[in-house]
Amino acid sequence: MVAKLRSGDLVKVIYGKDRGKQGKILKVLPNGRLVVEGVQIVKKHKRAQEEGQEAGIVSMEASIDRSNVMLVDPETGKPTRVGVSIKREVRGGKVKTTRTRISKKSGKEIKV
């Protein structure tokens, strides 16, 4: 199965306290959550782990559910749903199947 949202994709938050913000996906977690650049900023208290590292309060991005974001269409710059296009080719007697992500608004292929 092809993942509809991947690291490096530009997404827009459609629900929550950061609604309207855009950012790149930094990390996709296996439980259906994403870490997006500049979204869901929380403050974390850090303890000094080593001698060279300082303790203090650090701002960092927390995870957000993937249902709260939409991929930004590279053609129009607006949020869009993502579909999957399946292409089958016969090479040397074997059937080669490739799945690519497409934008529902523009119909164009999405490249990372």
Image: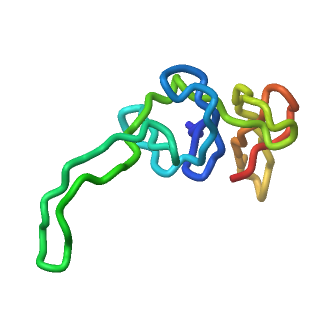
Instruction: Say which quarter of the image contains residue 81.
Output: top right
- Which residue appears at 86% of the width and 36% of the height? 76
Residue 52 in picture, x, y percent from top left: 18, 79
Apparent side of residue 67 relative to residue 63 in the rendered image (left or right): right
Apparent side of residue 28 relative to residue 96 in the rendered image (left or right): left
Give above or below for 63 relative to 49: above
Residue extending farthest bottom: 52
Residue 82 in picture, x, y percent from top left: 70, 30
Residue extending farthest top: 15
Badge count: 0
Front residue (pair 100, 26):
26
Residue 41 in picture, x, y percent from top left: 41, 41
- Which residue appears at 52% of the width and 29% of the height? 18
Residue 112 in picture, x, y percent from top left: 68, 53
- How is the rendered protein coloured? rainbow
Front residue (pair 92, 47):
47
Split into 4 quadrants, where in the image is the N terminus? top right
Residue extending farthest front: 56
- Which residue appears at 83% of the width and 26% of the height? 105
- Which residue appears at 77% of the width and 58% of the height? 92
Apparent side of residue 41 relative to residue 13 in the rendered image (left or right): left
Give above or below for 18 relative to 44: above
